[in-house]
Image: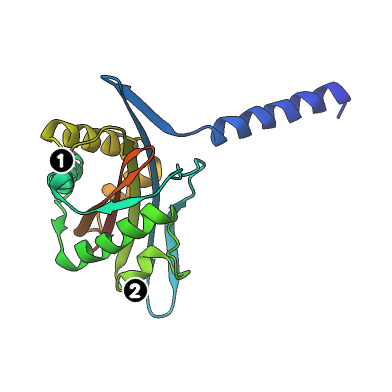
Amino acid sequence: MNMKKRTKNVLKAFIAAVTVAALSYTFTFTNVSIVNAAKTAVEKTTKTSTVKKAAVKTTSKVMEAKAGVVKKTDERTGEVNDKLLSEINSLRASKGLGELKMDSTLVSIAGTRSEEASEKWSHERPNGEQGIDMIDSTRWRGENLSYVVYPGYEGSEKEQDKVVEKMFDSLVASPTHYDNMVFGNFTKIGIATDITETSEGTKLTTAYMFSN
């Protein structure tokens, strides 16, 4: 390979790497900036084998609070989870798939995972296990994670609608997140949203736990 051709190939590889590393979601509307990111993982396990179906690592770094972080649990996410479920089921219906039913056990797991993911942006839990390990290993199981940072967030219905729109749009735009939402073997879901006040704004982190 001559030097000129080799240089061109190296340049192409560098440009590709920069493009991948730059992937993130930033939305601006009515003077409000929302930073949106997502992660996904799904696998099927049996007593004798483990088959990984999909996994993706984010290329974006989580925004860390520069000042103290304050946890709050209140009504400012009251409609987010239900509306996200509605959006996911509408998508599934458009593909001829049955709707996902909200499951109390998965909701409880999602509650734990949304809080953990707010602190550690990863499918790996603080104890070193994977988030999907919290679901019965004899079943299909999957996890989507997403968050938005919303400066000036007060939790109005309009603001919650915007959070749902941005979260859902980013999930649909990601092939692996999309695959989880339209995976035919999933019949149940748990959705929970953690809310944290940071110096960057209100951070809403949502976990979606899928199973059957």
- Relative to 114, is 17 above or below? above
Circle 1 Cα neighbour tier, 10 Å, few/some/many (<14 / 14–19 / ≥20): some
Locate the N terminus by quadrant.
Answer: top right
Q: Nearer the viewer, residue 80 or 181?
A: 80
Q: Position of residue 123 (x, y in %)?
A: 42, 58
Q: Indicate which disc residue 137 carries.
A: 2
**Residue at numbered disc 1:** 90
Q: CA distance from mark 2 to mark 1?
A: 28 Å
In the image, farthest residue toward the right: 2
Amino acid carrying mark 2 in the image: Ser
Q: Quadrant of residue 158?
A: top left
Whether label 2 touches label 1, CB < 8 Å: no
Q: Indicate which disc residue 80 carries.
A: none
Circle 2 Cα neighbour tier, 10 Å, few/some/many (<14 / 14–19 / ≥20): some
Q: Position of residue 121 (x, y in %)?
A: 43, 52
Q: Nearer the viewer, residue 160 or 98?
A: 160
Q: Nearer the viewer, residue 157 or 191?
A: 157
Dot 2: element: loop
Residue placed at 36% from the left, 37% from the top?
Answer: 36
Dot 1: element: helix
Q: How many marks?
A: 2
Q: Position of residue 164 (x, y in %)?
A: 22, 38
Amino acid carrying mark 1 in the image: Ser
